[in-house]
Amino acid sequence: MSLKAFHVLFITASVALSFWFGWYELDRYATTKAAADMWLGIGSCVTGGTLIAYGIYFLKKLKNISYL
Amino acid sequence: MEIPHAVKPRPDTGLYNAKLGIWLFLASEVMLFGGLFSAYILLRVSSDLWPHGMVSIPVGTFNTFVLIASSVTVVMSWASLKLGKLADFKKYMALTILCALGFLSVKSFEYYAKFTHYDVWFKDQATAQKYFTAAYGEKGEEAARKLFVERFHLQNTKATYDANQVQIAGHIEGNPLFATLKKLTSAKKDTIQFTPDAPSGTHEHPKAIEVKLSDVHRLSAYVPAHSTYFAIYFTITALHGLHVLGGAIVLTYFLLTSDKWWKKNPEQLANRVEVGGLFWHFVDLVWIFLFPIIYLL
């Protein structure tokens, strides 16, 4: 597996973590009403979206490099 | 003599030597961290009480963000070499190393905060009650109970309060590192000035209280000897931190010797950086699992 393939796997895991953490923090915010929880939740979901966009850009940029 | 398959892939494996080597190494690393993760799970499920909220979520989130960013920059540095852009490689690799140093710096501050934060266990409940009142006023026992219940997430269980709870958390005056009851007693101290943690839901610390060491059963900073939780926390995070440090040293070496390798054999430099990048991604992937387990769950 090349660095390209491993990077795609890593970004996928990071996107999953970002959205899960975003949900976790927003769920916490519903109980605590703490602004920090809300911003962490929103920031994490935005990061997840940004990582998806980055992943697509990365795949286009390195389309000529092998996955092996 | 030229070593075969240092650059070109072997026909049978389809991989050059270093890539095969790093994957074998990473397989052993999976077993190492897999063993530690298993230990964590077994310790946790077999424990009666497991603390929560002992580490700062915003700090952990920041470090997670830093590591994800470093993975992006390390792969960009490799891609730059593949595209023949040495200057871009240097820029991205320098950013990766900065991220690594940033992660380690934040982790050091986290560790320092733990090493200067203490739990004090009193000899009996009556003594503890006296200090709870001194720290938090008339409703001292209630405040101490609330902190205890929150730390161990007991609000979700039938056991709302451990009748034997006799501990209080806070800071010793002067923020000594790694103090223990034995060390303080050996230093001929009879009392300590102790600033208890803020009551639940607030950030205002109560005034410092004077604690007689003769009333103390045990005193420990948040170090591995404190509890099973901190033992496994420091074992896993310190091992991970050492991997970050090792990776940063190797990547720095690639950066510093890149001009020489670029002139000699640019393809081999790209392969070396790819192998370093694979290790770096593995270390970051470990953190992606570590962060929710240690900080959130």
Image (cartoon, coloured by chain):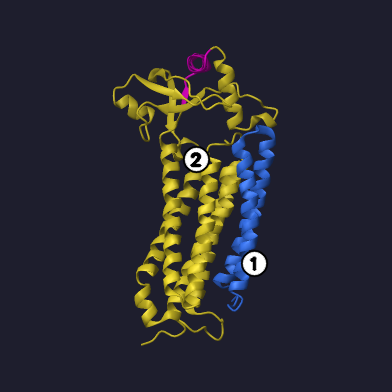
Chain colours: A blue, B yellow
Farthest residue, direction left: B187
Proximity of marks 2 and 1: CB atoms separated by less than 8 Å: no
Residue B99 location (% of width, % of height): 45, 56
Disc 2, SS? helix
Q: Is residue B206 visible?
A: yes
Q: How many marks?
A: 2
Residue A19 location (% of width, % of height): 66, 51
Viewer-side residue, B192 vs A44: A44
User: Which-is-in-front pick, marks 2 and 1?
Assistant: 1
The residue that label 2 is drawn on is B230
Mark 2 → mark 1, Cα distance in angstroms: 40 Å
Question: Type of residue at label 2?
Answer: Phe
Residue B157 location (% of width, % of height): 69, 31
Farthest residue, direction top: B138
Q: Chain of mark 2?
A: B
Mark 1 surroundings: few (<14), some (14-19) or many (≥20) residues within 10 A: few
Magenta span: predominant SS is helix
Which residues are the magenta region? B120-137
Question: Type of residue at label 1?
Answer: Ile
Name the side, left or right, on which B219 lies relative to B32. Answer: left
Hey, which quadrant is residue A60 in on the image?
bottom right
Residue at (41, 37) in percent of width and height? B115
Residue A64 location (% of width, % of height): 59, 79
| Position above or below: B189 against B180 | above
> Which image quarter holds the C terminus of chain B?
top right
Hey, which quadrant is residue B267 in on the image?
bottom left
Viewer-side residue, B66 vs B133: B66
| Position above or below: B187 against B58 | above
Tell me, yes or no, whether dots 2 and 1 are on the same chain.
Answer: no
| Position above or below: B199 against B221 | above
Mark carried by residue A56: 1
